[in-house]
C-alpha cells in the first residue's frame, strides 16, 4: 500500500496550479482580446499619470456647508400671495456663517451695521434679534431665532500654508442652492500697514485675485478639510480674508462676555516690513504717540525705541507679531515682555 499524500503537499500543488492558470489566462487574454493598454503589473510604478478629480470632494463639502452659510439681504416687502419676501441679486448684502447652534451668526461691518436686514439660511427666512460688533477685527455677530443650527469649525493658524486650495459658498437670491467657487491662498501673513497697533488687526490672508464678478463680502473660505480659514473683507479695494485666528477669538469673547485688551502701543513689524531677518517689533510711530497715555504699557515702563522680542514664552516672529500674541490674553492678565533696549535684553512685567 502507498502512503496517501499529506494535506501540506496538496495545498502546495493547488497553489502552483492556481498561479499557472492565472498567468496563462492573463497572457491568453492579452493575445486574443487586448481590451486595454493598461499594464496592471506596473500600475503602481505609474502613479504620476493617475488623474484625481479634486473638485468633487470640494463640491461634496460645499453641499454640506449650505446649512452653515447664509445670505444677508435688504429688507423687502412681503408678498401677500406667497406670504414671504422675494429677493433679487440687488438685494444681496453679503454672506454670514453659523458660529453657534443656538442662533449666533458672523458676518462683517461691511455687510451689516444694524438689524435692518433679513437672513436666508436653507429654506427659511429669519429676522435679526440681537447684534454685537468686534471693533478689533471688523467682525459682526447677530442672533436669529433658531436652536438647531450647524456651526462652522475654525482652522488652526499654525496649519495655514501658501498654496492651500480653498472653496466658498455664496447664497443665490433666486435658488435654494448656493454658488460654489474655488481659490488658492497666496499669502498667509499680509501686513497692510507700515505702522501697526496692538489694539487693531495687524495682518490678513490673501487669496488669488482671479475672483468671480459677484458680491463676495463676508464670503467664508474653507480649506479642503471643511474648516473655516477666513471671511472676505474689502481692504482698500483689495479682497483679503479676516483670519480664522482672530474670528475664533472674537467668537470666544462674544460667548464668554469678555472684551479684547488694550496695550495701546504703536510699532513696526521689523521682519515683515523690511524683508530681512530683524529681531522683534519696534515701538515707534513717526507722527502719533507710540505709547498711549494711562496705558498698561506706559505704566509698566515701556519706551519708544524698545524692541519687543517675546511675550512670556512666545517669541515675536514674522508669523507671530506682538498683536497676534496679545490677543490670547484677557484684560487683567499679567505678562512678561522681553525687550531689547540699547542692545541690552531685559524683562518688563505688564498688567494688561
Image: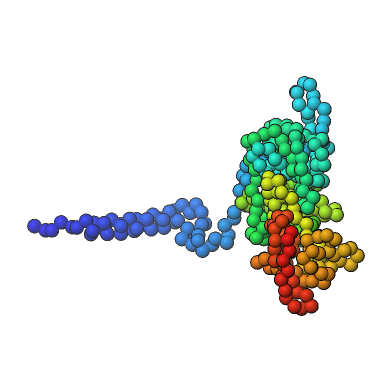
Indicate left or right for 86 with 122 as reference.
right
Residue ID at (75%, 34%): 129
Horizontal and vertical percent position of residue 27: 41, 58
Residue ID at (82%, 30%): 76
Residue ID at (74%, 71%): 339
Most foreground residue, 22 or 296: 296
Residue ID at (67%, 58%): 157
Asked if residue 303 shows in the view, the reply is: yes
Q: Going by the picture, which residue comes out furthest to the bottom?
A: 343
Residue 150's place in the image compared with 316, above or below, is: above
Residue 275's place in the image compared with 213, above or below, is: below
Quadrant holding the N terminus:
bottom left
Most foreground residue, 232 or 305: 305
Horizontal and vertical percent position of residue 113: 82, 42
Quadrant holding the C terminus:
bottom right
Residue 76's place in the image compared with 238, above or below, is: above
Indicate left or right for 100 with 137 as reference.
left
Most foreground residue, 28 or 152: 152
Most foreground residue, 92 or 182: 92
Asked if residue 316 shows in the view, the reply is: no
State which quadrant residue 312 falls in: bottom right
Q: Going by the picture, which residue comes out furthest to the top?
A: 81
Q: Going by the picture, which residue comes out furthest to the right?
A: 287
State which quadrant residue 82 falls in: top right
Amino acid at each position: 500500500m502507498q502512503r496517501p499524500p499529506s494535506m501540506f503537499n496538496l495545498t502546495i500543488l493547488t497553489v502552483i496550479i492556481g498561479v499557472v492558470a492565472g498567468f496563462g489566462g492573463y497572457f491568453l487574454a492579452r493575445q486574443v482580446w487586448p481590451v486595454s493598454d493598461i499594464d496592471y503589473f506596473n500600475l503602481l510604478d505609474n502613479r504620476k499619470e493617475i488623474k484625481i478629480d479634486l473638485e468633487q470632494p470640494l463640491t461634496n463639502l460645499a453641499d454640506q456647508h449650505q446649512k452653515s452659510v447664509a445670505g444677508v439681504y435688504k429688507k423687502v416687502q412681503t408678498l401677500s400671495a406667497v406670504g414671504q419676501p422675494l429677493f433679487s441679486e440687488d438685494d444681496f448684502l453679503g454672506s454670514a456663517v453659523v458660529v453657534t447652534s443656538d442662533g449666533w451668526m458672523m458676518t462683517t461691518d461691511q455687510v451689516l451695521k444694524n438689524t435692518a436686514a433679513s437672513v436666508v439660511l436653507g429654506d427659511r427666512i429669519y429676522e435679526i434679534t440681537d447684534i454685537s460688533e468686534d471693533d478689533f477685527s471688523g467682525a459682526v455677530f447677530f442672533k436669529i431665532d433658531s436652536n438647531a443650527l450647524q456651526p462652522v469649525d475654525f482652522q488652526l493658524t499654525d496649519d495655514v500654508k501658501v498654496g492651500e486650495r480653498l472653496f466658498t459658498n455664496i447664497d443665490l437670491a433666486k435658488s435654494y442652492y448656493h454658488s460654489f467657487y474655488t481659490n488658492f491662498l497666496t499669502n498667509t501673513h499680509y501686513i497692510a500697514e507700515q505702522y501697526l497697533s496692538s489694539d487693531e488687526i495687524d495682518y490678513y490672508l490673501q487669496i488669488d485675485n482671479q475672483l468671480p464678478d459677484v458680491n463676495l463680502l463676508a464670503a467664508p473660505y474653507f480649506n479642503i478639510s471643511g474648516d473655516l480659514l477666513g471671511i472676505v473683507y474689502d481692504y482698500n479695494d483689495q479682497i483679503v480674508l479676516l483670519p480664522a485666528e482672530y474670528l475664533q477669538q472674537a467668537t470666544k469673547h462674544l460667548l464668554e462676555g469678555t472684551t479684547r485688551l488694550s496695550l495701546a502701543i504703536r510699532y513696526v513689524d521689523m521682519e515683515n516690513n523690511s524683508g530681512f531677518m530683524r529681531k522683534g517689533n519696534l515701538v515707534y510711530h513717526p507722527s502719533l504717540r507710540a505709547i498711549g497715555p494711562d496705558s498698561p504699557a506706559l505704566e509698566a515702563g515701556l519706551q519708544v525705541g524698545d524692541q519687543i522680542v517675546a511675550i512670556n514664552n512666545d517669541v515675536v516672529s514674522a508669523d507671530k507679531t506682538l498683536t497676534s500674541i496679545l490677543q490670547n490674553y484677557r484684560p487683567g492678565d499679567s505678562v512678561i515682555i522681553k525687550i531689547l533696549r540699547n542692545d541690552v535684553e531685559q524683562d518688563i512685567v505688564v498688567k494688561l
